Amino acid sequence: MAQSGSQEGPLLSGVAQRYASALFELAQEANSVDAVAGDLDRFGRLIQESADLQRLIRNPVFTAEEQAGAIGAILDKTGISGLAGNFIRLVASKRRLFALPDMIRAYRELVADAKGIVRAQVMLAEQPSDKVMNEIKAALRDVAKADVALDVKIDPSLIGGLIVKMGSRMVDASVRTKLNSIRLAMKEVR
């Protein structure tokens, strides 16, 4: 039992990667890589913002027809069509909606790789100003020696500072971590 649970992650990412790669190749042939990325990002935001949509894509109780019908209505209402719309409809008909967020993420990574863009995740205690964001982006661009796309997440528990993850590297310059280090050092002194 434990083995099958541990394999679920790689299986899911394999499915997501295969679907995303196929879509990326089609988008390249149609010269619509950016348009497809934009439509997928819009649909991804819809998933994040709607608990009902999250339930629809994750709940196996819904039949393929119910999922395809609901997804079709959403796509029609939002105006997502073309390759991205057809792709999402295909995913729904194949009962793979549960993997759609990972497919969108994998597609975004393929686009970034093709453009030579490095992705970095930045966690901050509060929403930064544009000036601060530009400074962070410039510093990361110097380190990566490439354009950098930032995924910004706000986590008030950091208190201040930031945590940056880029590739296999991570820099934790948060106040929370510094306070924990001081607390640990004080315990050792006793």
Image (spheres, rainbow, N blue to C red):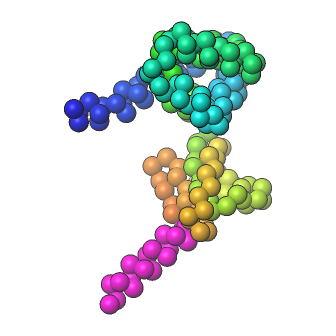
Location of the N terminus by quadrant is top left
Relative depth, front residue between 165 and 8: 8
Q: Position of residue 12 (x, y in %)?
A: 41, 27
Q: Is residue 169 above or below residue 116?
A: below
Q: Is residue 179 one of those drawn in magenta?
A: yes
- At a point 35% along the width and 84% down the height, the residue shown is 187
Location of the C terminus by quadrant is bottom left
Q: Is residue 174 above or below residue 99?
A: below
Please identify the quarter of the rendering in which residue 117 is found. Answer: top right
- At a point 29% along the width and 33% down the height, the residue shown is 5
Q: Position of residue 89 (x, y in %)?
A: 59, 13
Q: Residue furthest bottom?
A: 190
Relative depth, front residue between 130 and 4: 4
Q: Position of residue 186 (x, y in %)?
A: 39, 85
Relative depth, front residue between 25 and 177: 177
Say whether residue 190 is left or right of residue 122.
Answer: left
Give the magenta-colored segment's residue range. 173-190
Please identify the quarter of the rendering in which residue 125 is found. Answer: bottom right
Say whether residue 150 is left or right of residue 63.
Answer: right
- At a point 69% along the width and 29% down the height, the residue shown is 42
Q: Is residue 159 one of those drawn in magenta?
A: no
Q: Position of residue 110 (x, y in %)?
A: 56, 29
Magenta residues: mostly which secondary structure? Answer: helix
Q: Is residue 126 above or below residue 15?
A: below
Q: Please indicate, yes or no, whether residue 37 appears anywhere in the rendered image.
A: no
